[in-house]
Amino acid sequence: MSALMLLLWLGSDVAASRDLQKARDAQDRAALTRIAEQRENAASKSQTAAAHYSAAFAQSALAEVAAELRDRDLARKASNDGITEAERAVTANPKNAEYRRIHGTLCGQAAAAVGGLGALKFGKCALDEVNKAIELDPKAAINYLSHGIGNYYLPAALGGGVELAVQDFQKAISLDPKSSDAQLWLGIALRKLNRNGEARKAFQRAVDLNPTRVWAMQQLEKTPAP
């Protein structure tokens, strides 16, 4: 399920969802910051689980783009703000797989932004929450995508590793062949394994599925041909 379709499924505003995905794809930091602030304000007023989730989702998109742009301070702030919102959503509805997934994703983003020993606490949160999401909804491709990203950054000595990440991304693709994000991350993992030919094919599929995603095009261009 794409980010946009996921939000539509949850009943979020169509135009707002499209604006968020458009800003994420274009790496529009300013627009994402504005959207995240708007959603946080809405969540503080309504105090509903769905509103807290919506704010958490926007902060995760902002943290994602901040990491792509190597803005570590913004990635740290967005992921921490998002964790607060995600925790409120999970507290209100602990059996919602997507609330668990976004919480785990944000913890993973925080771990990457913090680094060092500070990442251990966030890393455990990421693993626990995404595993819970898979347990609650084992057929959701986006859960395996998040799991794969976690494994990509988690050292093999701690139970992760790039090989495991590749398996997760392939599982996500088998469940949702139109997931451009799963193709993108599969390419990143394959490149890490020096399988550049396969990586380029995955990046090309990601671009074909979502031509507006700037980061996918950047990854394709920087990956050498075999």
Image (cartoon, rainbow, N blue to C red):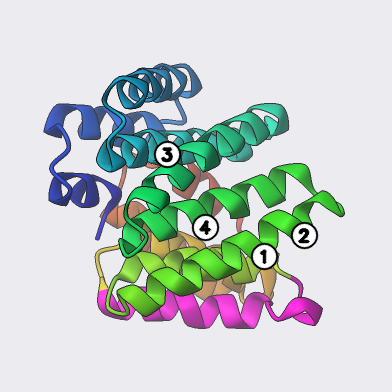
Separation of marks 3 and 2 at Cα, in angstroms:
21 Å
Name the secondary structure under disc 2: helix
Q: Is residue 203 left or right of residue 17?
A: right
**Please, what is the three-letter code of the amino acid marked with disc 1?**
Lys
Q: N-terminal of the two: label 4 or label 2?
A: 4
Q: Which residue is mark 4?
A: 104
Q: Is residue 8 left or right of residue 134?
A: left
**Please, what is the three-letter code of the amino acid marked with disc 2?**
Leu
Name the secondary structure under disc 3: helix
Residue range corresponding to the magenta coloring = 155-175
Instruction: Specify whether residue 138 is painted magenta.
Output: no
Q: N-terminal of the two: label 3 or label 2?
A: 3
The residue under the point 15% across, 32% down is 13
Q: Which residue is mark 1?
A: 124
Quadrant housing residue 137:
bottom left
Name the secondary structure under disc 4: helix
Q: Mark 1 and 4 residues: CB-CB less than 8 Å, in contact?
A: no
The residue under the point 63% across, 34% down is 75
**Please, what is the three-letter code of the amino acid marked with disc 4?**
Gly
Instruction: Specify whether residue 157 is painted magenta.
Output: yes
Q: Mark 3 and 2 residues: CB-CB less than 8 Å, in contact?
A: no
Q: Which residue is mark 2?
A: 120
Q: Which residue is mark 3?
A: 56
Q: Nearer the viewer, residue 36 or 66?
A: 36
User: Disc number at residue 142?
Assistant: none
